[in-house]
Every structure is written in structure tokens, then in C-alpha cells.
Amino acid sequence: MSEDKRKNDIAEGQDDGATKESRRDFLKKLGVAAAATTVAPAATAKAASIAEHLQTHFEMMSDSQKEKAIARLEKRYSEQFEKQVTVANTPAPDGVLFGYALNISKCIGCRRCVEACVRENNQSRGEEDTRHLPIQWIRVLEMTRGNDTFQLENWHKGSPSSSPIGDYGVQSGGHADKAVGISGHAEHYYYPEQVPEENSFYFPVQCQQCEDPACVRACPVRATFRDPNGIVVIDYNWCIGCRMCQLACPYWARRFNWGEPILPNEDMNPKTHYLGNRPRMRGVMEKCTFCLQRVRDGRYPACVEACPVGARKFGNLLDPESEIRKILANKKVFRFKEDFNTEPKFFYYMD
Amino acid sequence: MISARKHMRAAVLVGLFFVAISGLILHNMPGEAVAQEDAAQHEESGAAVQEAPAEATQEEAAVEQEAPAEVAQEEPAVEQEAPADAAPATSAAGVECYESRKDATKILQVQNANPKYGYPNVKCSPTTGAVLWYGDPYTGTEPIGEMPTYGDKTDGDFAQAVIRPRTGHLKTIQQTNMQCSGCHQAPPQQTNPRQLMMHQDIVSDASKLQHGRGAIWCLDCHNAENRDTLIDQQGNEVSFNQSQKVCGSCHGDLYSDWRMGLHGKRTGEWKVGGKKRWWTCTECHNPHTVQEHRFDPVKPEPPPALPRGMSKDDLKGAEGHGDHGGGH
């Protein structure tokens, strides 16, 4: 990086008029220090500019700052992935509260939603046999269908049936046919030849887009916040990677980038949104955003379009004619872990 | 307020420290090696179906059907990496994938229908061949046609509803490349339920049809007078493209759910009244086996990567893995 370019980058980083003078000076000095450390090897297209590190929170940026930030990102991504990448800043549509409904009596556990999500949202594809696991925002849990507690063949067995003290027909915890301490079982590493398997049902879990999100409360720097359409988003540039939100989330919906994301150029989806599927850097949190880049353009999320059985429904909760409102009115609906008072905008329903 | 600012500053400091370190490490990572490894991984998944996205429009489906999977198997991973920003003319021959249900729709040709962003139109899974992603969800569709009105407000949805015609995807028509009337010109002389000499790949024993629990037979849905069409319970002739009318004449509750969008699949715009591709009944359900299973079983996409130190053997049985659900 030449001396001039570095100066320019620093100058660009200063345009956050909203912050205090002292902070700016402080950041400027730090920025120079950071630049000095990264300059040593030949600067690659992958390296984020100093200006990008010094930009303010997305919500605090003025329009011109947003434009600059997005131009920087588009340039960097286009160089890195060797194709024209667009980073949109489509605003949240008015009068819309996004809701999602999933029919658990239809889901066949084929995981096509997971794959579609990975492709659409530029998740890291990961590497075999390293700590660098692929990132998937959706998990599909497989559970045993039926009343697990009282199965006829286990009717006369106590629990645990394999207890060292013998089988006395006394329920001592857990389920009648499960060892103590295991109440029911959900498996997301299932790998049968074909799905759906008999006596199984499937329960996909992803970000529930809570109305009172525990992750937002936990974030010390407000890098994650709730957008006006009810989607919880992350400003990846503002995230410090402390993983407090991951700890706070009761739904296991957040994923952390432990390493530089592995995203082959040809697999990269070039249509991105600043708060949505733009390529993430190492050390930041990421999660489902209901495909922000698609739904703000009017399209269904990718998982809805990929689901082969139509178990996934999406729409505007404020429109009484929408699919989602009709599901709430007509079907048996529940929310996952309702007792946490997080008020998810993600509903599960049955026929 | 002051403490909050202090907190922010500390956070930024920590962030910048990470940035400095990450910058150093990042420069030592050869990007090419990463890409190659990933390509190797793709090869390992070893499916006959290639990764390159595929799409066949309706008109081409009939022509292209002689170039199926054998071609795909002969040509290894060379053509696999069709760039996502391919020019509209680019196509990878021999790619075969399907939408909701295997044998219901086959997509045999790559076609870039959305050059605005350089999208391929359809992306298929390299492991199962299932369509995962639509660039333009309306390719090859036509207006849904006349729909009976029930007086509810969702009627606005019909104005822009489109479907993909089913006729070209019917199994026999694909195999023989001709309409049903090519063989069935006259109405059958025998109309009682019996085992047929033909079409055993579709229905193994028509006298035990897996639909309607013995109450219905072929000619309750297939029009005996004109085999290129279906017939509903009121005796109306219905096109194969409009199978929902036949299904709906018995399954009224599901039909009404489908009309409201509570049942079945739609792609396109989420807005009420927006342009949507509706999926008709037979695109997801096989009407001949629907009693056995609502959906034909399919091969699932691969499971998520196991945490380090865990093998598949650790997963067998319920014991011993009540605690790995964390991942945090």
C-alpha cells in the first residue's frame, strides 16, 4: 500500500462527524499503527481498508458515509471474487413486519433449505479435517415420531432399563425408555439413504427473529440490532467477535467465523446486501436474516423457494390477507421455547 | 453514558488489535490452495449429477431429453465449475436435476435467464441433483388460467399467478415423445379395475391403486374420451396443467388451503397479489402412490460437519450424545 493511498484511507475513515473529537484522534493514531503492521507483506485484495475498520456503526452513518462504505466494499469484494459484486443498501419497506411459518407435519428433513441458504448467503464452505468447519445457519433436527414416553414394548420396563441395580419398573427420571437425564432426543447429524424415515419428524431451527431478542440485549457494542421489519441483523464491521450474543441466544441460531471464510469465487453469490449476505470476515458473528437481500426486493427467502414440500411460508404479519396471517388464524401454531419471552416472529404449525 | 462510551472505545481497541493480527495471518494464507482443496472436496462428493446449474424451458424439454445423465457421468469435473457470471450462451450439456419430485420435472440444460446480475437461472445440488436455487422463478411458466372464485380477497393473487406446464414432464410423454392420444385413440372397451399390461412403471397393479383405498381407478381421473386430458368428478375435461382442479374436486379442504397459500409451494414475490409461481398438486405428490406416502422419499443433502473428535459411530443410539447439542 503506497503512502498516498494509506493517507487517503485514513482520511476517508475520519468522515464520521457524529463521533467525538477525542475518539477520532484516538482512532486515527490506532489506524496508523494498524496500517503499519499490515503493510509489510504485499497488500492483497482481501485485506479490508483502514477506512473500513474506522467506519462507524451502520445505523449512525450518514447517507454519504453509507455510500462510501458500500463503494469500498463493492470494490474489495469485486477484486477478491473476480466478478462484479453489488452490495445493496435497500431500505426496509414500510408497513411490513416479516413473519415466517414452518409446517412441521410436512417437513421431510431433506436439508435442501440448508444447502440453499449456504449458497444464497455466502456462508463459509469450510474444510475437512480442520477446525475450520463449514457454516450453516439452519439446523434440521430429527426426532422420533409418536409418544416417546409410553411405548408398548417398554410398558413394563423401568428406567433406566440398563440400570446396574436392576429393572424394577420404577420410573426414576428422564423418559420411561431412556436413560436418566436424557429427555427425548433430537439428532441433527442424521444420514439415512432416504428421507423421510418412518416414525421420524423433523424440526428445522434457524434464527427466530425475536421481538425481544436476547442477542441484541447481550451485545456490548450493539453490532446486532433489530431492523424496522423485525429482522435481527448484524453490522459485521462493528462486531467485535465477543460471542456474547451466541451465548445469549436460546435457539442456537448464531454462527461464529472462527477462520477466514472459505468461499470459492465461482460459488459466491454476487448480489449482496450490507446487512445480509455480503461476505463476512473472520472473527464475526453471523446468522439468518430471512434473506434480507431478497425479501427487501420482494422475493421469498431462498429456503422457502428451495423447500420441495412447501413446508416453509413467509409473509407480512401486518397484512391480514397474507399467507402467514392465514396460517396464524387457521392452523395449530406454536413458537419455539415460548417461555423465554423472546416473542419470535418464527412460527411452527401443524396441519 | 460516559461509561458506555468507554466501553465502546475499549471494544474498538480490541477490534483493531484483532484486525492488526488478522491482517498478518491473512497474508500468509495462499488463496489458490484453498480454492483447489474446495474443488477436490466437490469431486469427492462423487455424484453423477454435476454442480453446474441447469435449466430447460418447456419447449426445449422435449428436444433435449435424449441427452440425459450418461453424458454427465462421462464428463468429469472439468465443466463442473461453470462460472456464475457466465454469459447467457454458456451451457453445460447433460446436467440433469429436478425440482420438488424426482421424475416430475427434469431440468436438462443450463440457461442463464437473468443476465442482469450474471446469475445462472437454476442451481442444483451436486450431491442429490435437487434444484436449490432459482434466479428467475418464472422461466417457462404460463398464467395459471381460470380459477373458480370463492369470494375471498386472495383472488387478487390469481391475477399474477403462473404455473409451469406439466404436459411436457409427464413420464410416458417424455419416454415416447408423443401425446397419450398417440396410442389411446378410442375409449377402452373394458372399464373395470384390473391389472394393466402397460404403464406398470407408473402403477404396478392398477387394480390396487395406491390412491383412494380401492374406491377409484384410472378412468376416474383420466378422461376416457380424450386421453390427453383429465376429468374431474363433475365430468369436466381438465388439462394436465390444471391438475389441481381434479384433485380439488375430492380434496376440497386441501384445495382451499392451497388457494390461500397455506398448503403447497410458491416461489416469486411474498407480497399478497405479487407475481408468484404456484406449484400444482402433482409437482410435489405422485397421485398414483400418494396413499403409500405423501411425498416420494428422496436422498437428503449431507449432514452438517461433525465436531472435531466425533465420528459417526458416536451417534448410534440415544445414549451418550445428549450433551453435544450446544455447539456454543
Image: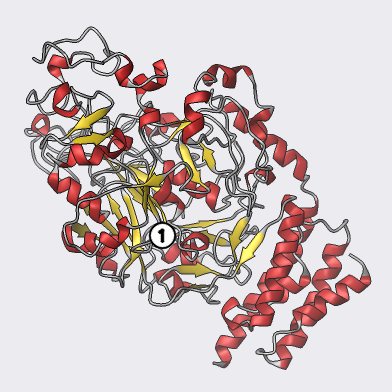
Of residues A134 and A91, the one nearer the viewer is: A91
Which quadrant of the rendered structure holds the N terminus of chain B? bottom right
Left or right relative to A282: residue B137: left
- Direction top: furthest residue: B197
Residue A141: percent from the left, percent from the top? Answer: 34, 44
Of residues A149 and A216, the one nearer the viewer is: A216
Of residues A295 and A281, the one nearer the viewer is: A295
Residue B87: percent from the left, percent from the top? Answer: 69, 43
Q: Residue at x 65, y 26 (%)?
A: B77
Residue A155: percent from the left, percent from the top? Answer: 7, 34
Left or right relative to B39: residue A192: left
Q: Residue at x 60, y 36 (%)?
A: A129
To which residue does mark 1 refer? A207
Q: Is residue A289 above or below residue B299?
A: below
Three-letter residue code for mark 1: Cys
Residue B38: percent from the left, percent from the top? Answer: 65, 37
Figure quadrant of residue B126 = top right
Q: Is residue B216 above or below residue B301?
A: above
Q: Is residue A15 above or below residue B109?
A: below
Figure quadrant of residue B101 = top left
Q: Residue at x 52, y 18 (%)?
A: B66
Q: Residue at x 10, y 25 (%)?
A: B216
Dot 1: what SS? loop
